[in-house]
Amino acid sequence: MAIEMDQHITNAEWEVMRVVWAQGEVSSKVIIEVLSKKRGWKEATIKTLIGRLVNKRVLQTKKEGRKFIYSTEVEEDALVNDTLDQFFHNVCSKDVGQTIQVLIEKAMLSHEDIASLKQALIRKEREAYDVVPCNCIKGQCRCHHNKNNEECC
Amino acid sequence: MAIEMDQHITNAEWEVMRVVWAQGEVSSKVIIEVLSKKRGWKEATIKTLIGRLVNKRVLQTKKEGRKFIYSTEVEEDALVNDTLDQFFHNVCSKDVGQTIQVLIEKAMLSHEDIASLKQALIRKEREAYDVVPCNCIKGQCRCHHNKNNEECC
DNA sequence: ACTGTTCGTTTACGCTTGTAATCAATAAAT
DNA sequence: ATTTATTGATTACAAGCGTAAACGAACAGT
């Protein structure tokens, strides 16, 4: 990721970011058109969101006449991956495999996706565990081996 | 999932939930022990979080003397999956495969996990797309085929 | 030159969240 | 019986968030 993404992007802000990612360089006008239609937000609301993203330096601005063109250095896939990483802190490492499986089952995947995922799994085999070590602390995980270890379970 | 999970669980609340999921039936005392150690939270803070979860009816209570035993009907995997589902609304369906791949690459997986994921992929092949249809609206996605369609791209 | 429109900025406001202190009721200890 | 500890409930409070109106400067149209 190009920028220190300690920034938290809220749900409403994601909508704005998606427009910026889609368009690359974009005026507030366009963002407002897209989102007022999609979400029924008032112009003012969308302006607020843009303003907040600029404050957080997630959006860059370039003056063009009296108005601004917005863009971002934050890459979409980087932010998606970071956000998911964050979330997976809430899940025991032993359960991640199962969780990914549910994702696969629910996703719409192409043949190409599937081939690529299979390849990834094959590569993964080289570093696979017999049993994935649990990363939970004692008291926060059901697995209860290793009871005397601070690092659960 | 056993209960209508329109409920939003905040990050801080997840910590409490993980204790409840780990223990099944648990007193505030234990929750406080675990989380004050893990997060350095004050007793009062953790009580607030428990109280909020009870208000949201995410936690059930059973009186035992003057104190309560807490439990939940919300299942961990259901909540994890719901939350991920939610999040994936922010991602173009065409990109989900790639996103899952990054998850796989970063995850710790067992041989068993991998075998199971492979199976899931094989099953998935039967309903695989040649090209995954994009579910974004116009203006929020880079893929620009089908320009005249409201449902992008 | 005036007027309406556009667009960024400022202000608003109630709700949620993280973090906690205080209070009140009860139980335990002396 | 009085004191102390436990524990749930109430109150607090600043920051973040969703949603938006109002303001002011600059532009566009006439």
Image (spheres, coloured by chain):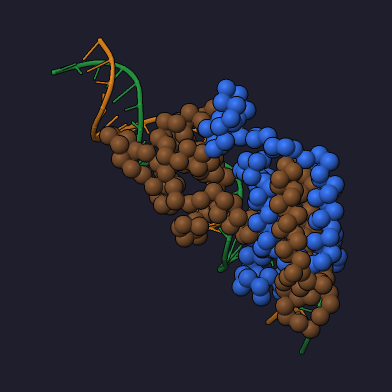
Chain colours: A blue, B brown, C orange, D green
Residue A42 higher or lower than D4, as above or below = below
Where is residue B82? Give x, y as percent: 58, 57
Q: Left or right: where does residue B62 sit relative to residue D2?
A: right
Q: Left or right: where does residue A22 sit relative to residue B67?
A: right
| Residue A23: quadrant of the picture | bottom right
Where is residue A148? Give x, y as percent: 57, 22
| Residue B64: quadrant of the picture | top left
Please tell me which residue is depicted at 84% across the width and 77% down the height of the picture.
B145
Of residues B84 and A101, the one nearer the viewer is A101
Where is residue B146? Give x, y as percent: 81, 80
Where is residue A150? Give x, y as percent: 60, 25
Is residue A121 visible from the viewing direction of this image?
yes
Is residue A71 visible from the viewing direction of this image?
no
Of residues A65 and A122, the one nearer the viewer is A122
Please tell me which residue is depicted at 54% across the width and 27% down the height of the picture.
B37
Please tell me which residue is depicted at 68% across the width and 61% down the height of the picture.
A105
Residue B107 higher or lower than B146, as above or below = above
Residue A53 higher or lower than B12, as above or below = below
Q: Left or right: where does residue B65 sit relative to residue A143?
A: left
Of residues B46 and A91, the one nearer the viewer is A91
Of residues D29 and A96, the one nearer the viewer is A96
Please tell me which residue is depicted at 52% across the width and 32% down the height of the picture.
A139
Quadrant of the image for the C terminus of chain B?
bottom right
- Numbered circles on residues, count: 0
